[in-house]
Amino acid sequence: MTTAVVRVLLADDEPLFRGTVSRLVDATPGMAVAGEAGTGRAAVALAAARRPDVVVMDVRMPDLDGIAATARITAVADPPRVLVLTAFDLDDHVYRALQAGASGFVFKDITPSRLVNAIRTVAAGESLLAPSVTRRLIAGHVPRRVPRRRLDGVTPREHEVLALVTRGLSNDEIEATLHISRGTLKTHIGSLLAKLAARDRAQLVIAGYEAGLADP
């Protein structure tokens, strides 16, 4: 039985960093570099031409910034997953990156092994939204004045789950807080994804922000 190779497009304007990540990806079993881009527009064009599974996207890109490029890349049918790279002083960009369709983000000083795991996580259809970083965003980096979103059709229990997801709790923490099983939690999250037309957990967090569930 063969295992599908995760094809990764690297978008970063720093050739040295891009080359380092390229070598890491190509040296990792089950991964391959699908292309490299040094500008946002080049990343959009290569994503359309090469159809990678994951795009590792820097925020600060010439020609077209990484957030705008992410929005264009994820606007097509069956888009690749986008993993956004950010620096510690760019937390305010994370919310906009998630709104643009990113499936998660990592900091640029991430270790090689963690970057590989992050790529695998988003390639598998999951979101990389660390609870500790989500809490930091809620504490002050996410814009406070966002449009209020109605949660039509969401049950009281699902509302509780969404509030905890929005606040950055992990599955284990939500299960312990609500005293529910992992299967029950997955059922609630699946229902929320359908009712809120959200692609993944990252978009559930956005929905929670827009519904005011991240307010102190």
Image: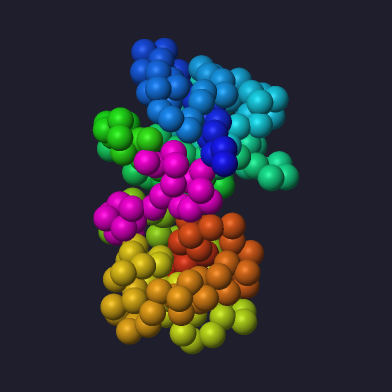
The structure residue drawn at horizontal position 52% and vertical position 23%, both measured from the top left corner, is: 33
Quick one: quadrant of the N terminus? top right
Report whether residue 93 is seen. no
Instruction: Judge from the rendering whether residue 188 lies leftward or rightward of residue 153; answer left or right.
Output: left
Q: Position of residue 204 (x, y in %)?
A: 50, 63
Q: Residue furthest front?
A: 1
**Picture colour scheme:** rainbow
Q: Find residue 27 and report its image quarter.
A: top left
Q: Position of residue 7 (x, y in %)?
A: 55, 31
Q: Is the stretch drawn in magenta largely helix, strand or loop?
A: helix
Q: How many marks?
A: 0
Instruction: Judge from the rendering whether residue 42 lies leftward or rightward of residue 186; answer left or right.
Output: right
Identify which residue, 134 or 104, lies in the foreground: 104
Q: Which residues are magenta?
A: 117-138
Q: Position of residue 56 (x, y in %)?
A: 47, 32
Identify which residue, 104 or 149, lies in the foreground: 104
The relative height of residue 162 versus residue 50 in the rendered view (above or below) is below
Instruction: Judge from the rendering whether residue 3 lies leftward or rightward of residue 118; answer left or right.
Output: right
Report whether residue 130 is seen. yes
Q: Residue furthest bottom?
A: 156
Q: Position of residue 62 (x, y in %)?
A: 51, 20
The structure residue drawn at horizontal position 56% and vertical position 20%, both measured from the top left corner, is: 35
Q: Residue furthest top?
A: 15
Residue 115 is a magenta residue: no
Quick one: quadrant of the C terminus? bottom left
The structure residue drawn at horizontal position 31% and vertical position 58%, both measured from the top left corner, is: 131
